[in-house]
Image: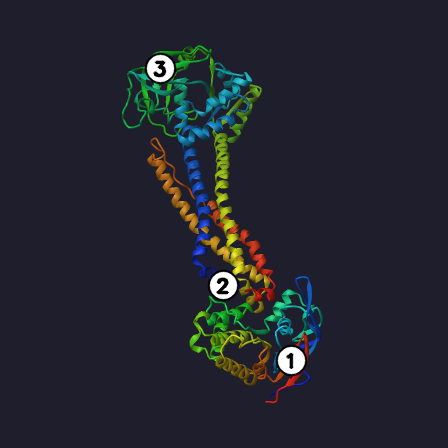
């Protein structure tokens, strides 16, 4: 029997029981829609976070953090910080501090004067600078706003991040006095709606809760002069400028926080080639006997893609379970159909239909259900993903919301289609095999 | 009636036996039958229920295999054939069942075409042939009706058209008038005789109805799994 005849016969059997076929198909639709919606949202999220990250990261810089396996910890921080765009803000830290916490257990620490050692390691290094990072808040006439404090070298930082460390109002001092600060866009406009707490030129209180010698907890304060407000960076400042950052001279940070220990060192390279990155990374790691982790933008991006791969696998896996349930539904319906059509199978065999054709007819029926279910499932999943993205953007899930553009890759499209049809066929194998093995004499006798 | 001698018999049974298990009890349904059906014959196998005639029908229809003895259908010993070969053989046999056994969701034409598509006939050819066959059995104006929209007699005509679809070696009928009224039954018998005489279609008919059996040229009577008489009908 020709393939189109087989499919035509299968289709006529489906048409006979429309409601039953529709309900069976609905199972596949739901399973595929769940997979497509979750994957296209996650992939859209990955693209948007990668773009944000690219804005914050410089491809010619390396970040040296204490601890031998800090990258994993950074990855965790980056994943969650990026996920909300606000989680990083809430904890008042970038992912890098999480890396720093790994250092406490190993006992190794970076100090601000290590930069000269690093500078001397290779001619491929332009410069390096230490950063001290702490969480605290800014007191603007009684209105407190949480922020992340960064002790940096202003001129080096400008050089390192020429496109993002740019003042929108006021100026970035090249020769700052100790109480000069530069603040990120969200520090003076926390709601991002123009309700500003202070402007360039104002004086604000810097408050840091010192808990370095527990049980004593002291609120350390000093009054700072706002020299400049940065333009909005967006994304999240990974090593680079952050909308939530308060930047003070490194010398001020050293005395205010009472430490020479820095949280990370940013190393600027002559070029962004992979060879340079890996050479310098190795030199630095070896120099500190493997007690530091050198993070490059490429490493972070590849880690990010690994993390998203895992998330997609996990979410896709959960969605796939619903497809398995649909598969069991198909099997159930096919067995019922097989019993109802025993006599019909007997007739077909008496007319000279081969066992493998009977098998194909049953598999054809479930393949048609799988195909229709998968196509409708992809469509509904895509619609669902777009609705979710709009809800996310409108802030329906709280806050001001964030923008995600769902992404349906050809791989996800083809994969869902194949998966939907595949599951339908696999679960129909047993009933189809039973149908094909029916003995014509017995099947014809069946009432 | 044309009767060509010295040709390979359509059906030849030699000491044919079939035993099947009814639960744990072996039942000898056919016990050493010898018979021969030649091309152009119209043979009826007559017998009461339990005589083994249905088992004979299943064997001649290549739906089942004998326990022992030989059954040659169109020259092939069916006990030596595998399932696939038996299936191929069935395409050369035109079945007509007591309960018509049409596919309910298909129209008369599609039911006839189904048999041809199973035998891999191309679409254009089978469409034309289905129309011709339905015309031959007198259902020219009923081709697009589904079985539920046809009377018993009309359904049996569709079944006969379907049985003829692949130019079978012979028609094998199982109580073909068992489920229709006597007037329609007479029409069906008339159609069968016409097919046998005018189109030289060989017919083997299994029935318990003596009146119907007498319409054949040769009547083989079965009882208790054996052939007890053979009557040549001199009409």
Callout 3 and callout 1 share a chain: no
Residue A356 percent across, percent down from the top left: 58, 61
Q: Which of marks 3 and 1 is in front?
A: 1
Residue A307 percent across, percent down from the top left: 49, 33
Residue plotted at (58% across, 57% down): A433
User: Label 2: how many residues lie within 10 Å, few (<14), some (14-19) or many (20+)?
Assistant: some
Using the rendered view, name the quadrant where residue A400 is placed.
Answer: top left
Report the Cα–Cα distance between label 3 and label 1. Answer: 115 Å
Report the Cα–Cα distance between label 3 and label 2. Answer: 79 Å
**What is the chain identity of the residue bearing mark 3?**
A
Quarter the N terminus of chain A occupies: bottom right
**What is the chain identity of the residue bearing mark 2?**
A
- What label sits on residue B221 in the rendered view? 1
Q: Nearer the viewer, residue B76 or A52?
A: B76
Quarter the C terminus of chain A occupies: bottom right
Residue B150 percent across, percent down from the top left: 44, 73
Q: Mark 3 points at which residue?
A: A206
In this view, A326 is above or below A206? below
**What is the chain identity of the residue bearing mark 1?**
B
Q: Which of B227 and A349 is in front in this view?
A: B227
Say left or right for A331 vs B19.
left
Q: Which of A133 and A270 is in front in this view?
A: A133
Looking at the rendered structure, the secondary structure element under dot 2 is helix
Determine whether label 2 and label 1 are within 8 Å by CB.
Answer: no
In this view, A24 is above or below A265? below
- What label sits on residue A9 in the rendered view? 2
The earlier-in-sequence mark between 3 and 2 is 2
Report the Cα–Cα distance between label 2 and label 1. Answer: 41 Å
């Amino acid at each position: 029997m020709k393939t189109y005849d087989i499919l035509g016969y299968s289709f006529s059997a489906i048409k006979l029981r429309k409601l039953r076929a529709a309900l069976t198909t609905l199972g596949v639709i739901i399973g595929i829609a769940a997979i497509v919606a979750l994957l296209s949202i996650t992939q859209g999220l990955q693209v948007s976070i990668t773009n944000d990250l690219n804005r914050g990261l410089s491809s010619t810089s390396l970040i040296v953090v204490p601890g031998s396996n800090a990258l994993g910890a950074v990855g965790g921080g980056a994943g969650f910080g990026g996920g909300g765009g606000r989680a990083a803000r809430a904890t008042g830290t970038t992912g890098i501090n999480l890396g720093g916490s790994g250092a406490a257990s190993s006992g190794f620490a970076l100090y601000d004067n290590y930069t000269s050692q690093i500078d001397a390691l290779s001619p491929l290094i332009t410069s390096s600078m230490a950063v001290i990072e702490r969480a605290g808040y800014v007191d603007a006439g009684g209105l407190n706003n949480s922020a992340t404090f960064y002790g940096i070298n202003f001129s080096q930082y400008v050089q390192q991040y020429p496109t993002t460390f740019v003042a929108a109002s006021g100026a970035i001092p090249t020769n700052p006095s100790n109480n000069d600060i530069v603040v990120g866009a969200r520090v003076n406009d926390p709601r991002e709606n123009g309700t500003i707490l202070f402007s360039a030129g104002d004086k604000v209180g810097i408050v840091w809760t010192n808990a370095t010698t527990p049980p004593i907890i002291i609120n350390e304060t000093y009054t700072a002069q706002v020299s400049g407000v940065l333009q909005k960076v967006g994304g999240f400042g990974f090593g680079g400028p952050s909308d939530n950052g308060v930047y003070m001279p490194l010398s001020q940070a050293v005395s205010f926080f009472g430490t020479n220990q820095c949280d990370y060192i940013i190393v600027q390279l002559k070029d962004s080639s992979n060879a340079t990155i890996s050479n310098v990374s190795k030199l630095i790691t070896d120099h500190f006997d493997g007690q530091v982790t050198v993070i490059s933008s490429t490493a972070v991006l590849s880690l990010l893609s690994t993390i998203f791969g895992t998330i997609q696998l996990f979410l896709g896996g959960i969605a796939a379970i619903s497809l398995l349930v649909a598969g069991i539904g198909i099997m159930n319906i096919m067995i019922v159909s097989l019993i109802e059509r025993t006599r019909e199978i007997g007739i077909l065999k008496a007319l000279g239909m081969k066992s493998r054709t009977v098998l194909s007819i049953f598999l054809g029926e479930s393949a048609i259900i799988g195909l229709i279910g998968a196509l409708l499932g992809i469509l509904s999943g895509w619609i669902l993903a777009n609705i979710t993205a709009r809800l996310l953007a409108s802030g329906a899930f709280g806050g001001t919301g964030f923008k995600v553009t769902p992404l349906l890759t050809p791989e996800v499209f083809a994969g869902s289609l194949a998966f939907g049809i595949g599951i339908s066929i696999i679960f129909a194998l047993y009933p189809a095999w039973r149908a094909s093995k029916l003995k014509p004499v017995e099947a014809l006798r069946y009432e | 009636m044309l009767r060509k001698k010295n040709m390979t018999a359509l059906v030849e049974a030699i000491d044919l036996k079939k035993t099947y298990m009814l639960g744990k009890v072996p039942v000898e349904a056919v016990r050493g039958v010898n018979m021969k059906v030649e091309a152009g014959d119209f043979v009826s196998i007559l017998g009461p229920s339990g005589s083994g005639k249905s088992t004979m029908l299943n064997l001649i229809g290549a739906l089942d295999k004998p326990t022992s003895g030989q059954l040659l259908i169109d020259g092939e010993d069916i006990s030596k054939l595998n399932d696939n070969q038996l299936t191929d053989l069935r395409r050369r046999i035109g079945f007509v069942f007591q309960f018509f056994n049409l596919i309910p969701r298909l129209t008369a034409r599609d039911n006839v075409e189904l048999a041809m598509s199973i035998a891999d006939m191309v679409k254009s050819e089978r469409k034309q042939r289905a129309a011709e066959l339905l015309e031959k059995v007198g259902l020219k104006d009923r081709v697009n009706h589904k079985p539920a929209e046809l009377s018993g007699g009309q359904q049996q005509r569709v079944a006969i058209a379907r049985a003829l679809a692949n130019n079978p070696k012979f028609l094998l009928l199982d109580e073909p008038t068992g489920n229709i009224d006597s007037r329609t039954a007479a029409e069906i018998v008339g159609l069968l005789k016409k097919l046998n005489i005018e189109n030289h279609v060989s017919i083997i008919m299994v029935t318990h109805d003596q009146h119907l059996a007498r319409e054949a040229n040769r009547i083989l009577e079965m009882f208790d799994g054996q052939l007890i008489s053979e009557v040549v009908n001199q009409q």
